[in-house]
Image (cartoon, coloured by chain):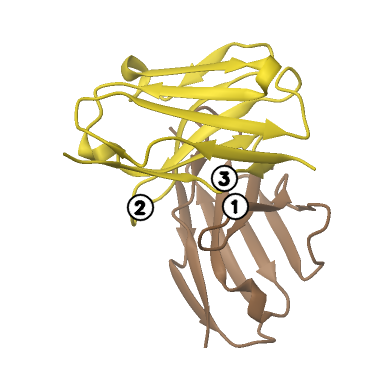
Amino acid sequence: QVQLKESGPGLVQPSQTLSLTCTVSGFSLTSNSVHWVRQPPGKGLEWVGAIWSGGSTDYNSALKSRLSISRDTSKSQVFLKMNSLQTEDTAIYFCTSNWDYWGQGVMVTVSS
Amino acid sequence: DIQVTQSPSFLSASVGDRVTINCKTSQNINRYLNWYRQKLGEAPKLLIYGANSLQTGIPSRFSGSGSGTDFTLTISSLQPEDVATYFCLQHDSWPNTFGAGTKLELK
């Protein structure tokens, strides 16, 4: 069955770079898009960006200058890198395939 | 960006009650709206896609309706396992945007 699992550091220092991995199974990254979504504590969901089945990417315009999404299709992994992290980037980060299936998310706290 | 206004934010209901949750969008999105259930610590689960299509494996007590700018998720007979947060997603226009969520509790 389709599964997605996010992994990454739980704590990142301000101004540092966040690196997250979404490992998928049950489908091919060359057939389905993968989106990243985040949810700050007590707030709503925000679309972060996406990598499409063809490998092209789209980013939230507010985050675009700090964000990079890539993939390794041989490992069924999608990567999110966000630099210059601030406390406002503290959130649960989810990956989702085609908006159908979601991972359970990974909590990222930006703090010194 | 399309704004999605979800209501109510909190809902308390009894087992067996009919429950409705609403999402209103700032522009016509046809039927490009999904509904999800999110339990604490779990992955969000797709319930309804295309405004009114039931995802495979989801109980028939869940239904969706609406088109254009006004949408409704209905639980026909609330069960204890339905306690969760529910949210909608519009995927008609980029960036795709979400409702703020409805926390559903048992009375």
**Label 3 Cα crowd, 10 Å radius (few <14 / some 14-19 / many 20+):** many
Please determine if labels 1 and 3 lie on a single subunit: yes
Per the image, the residue denoted by label 2 is: A43
Secondary-structure class at tag 2: loop
Which residue, as the protein is rendered here, is positioned at the far left?
A112
Q: Chain B is drawn in which colour?
A: brown
Give the residue displayed 51% in from the left and 23% down from the top: A79
Q: Which amino acid does label 3 sit on?
A: Leu
Q: Distance of mark 2 from mark 1, alpha carbons?
A: 15 Å
Return the x and y of residue B96 as percentages of the image width and height.
Answer: 52, 34
Q: Residue at x 57, y 66 (%)?
A: B21
A58 lies above or below A97: above
The answer to whether tags 2 and 3 share a subunit is: no
Q: What's the CA distance linking mark 1 and mark 3?
A: 12 Å
Question: Along the horizontal axis of the image, is B36 left or right of B4?
Answer: right
- The dot on residue B89 is 3
Instruction: Say which element carries label 3.
Output: strand
A33 up-or-down from B58: above or below: above
Residue B16 lies left or right of residue B55; in this view the side is left
Mark number displayed over residue B44? 1
Q: In which quarter of the image is residue A110?
A: top left
CB within 8 Å, label 2 to label 1: no
Q: Can residue B19 be seen in this view?
A: yes
Quarter of the figure that contains the N terminus of chain B = top left
Q: Position of residue A67 (x, y in %)?
A: 38, 19
Give x and y (percent) for residue B25. Answer: 51, 46
Q: Which amino acid does label 1 sit on?
A: Pro
For marks 1 and 3 on the same chain, the one whose residue lies earlier in the sequence: 1
The disc placed on residue B71 is none
**Which is in the foreground here, disc 2 or disc 1?**
1
Res. B32 in view: no
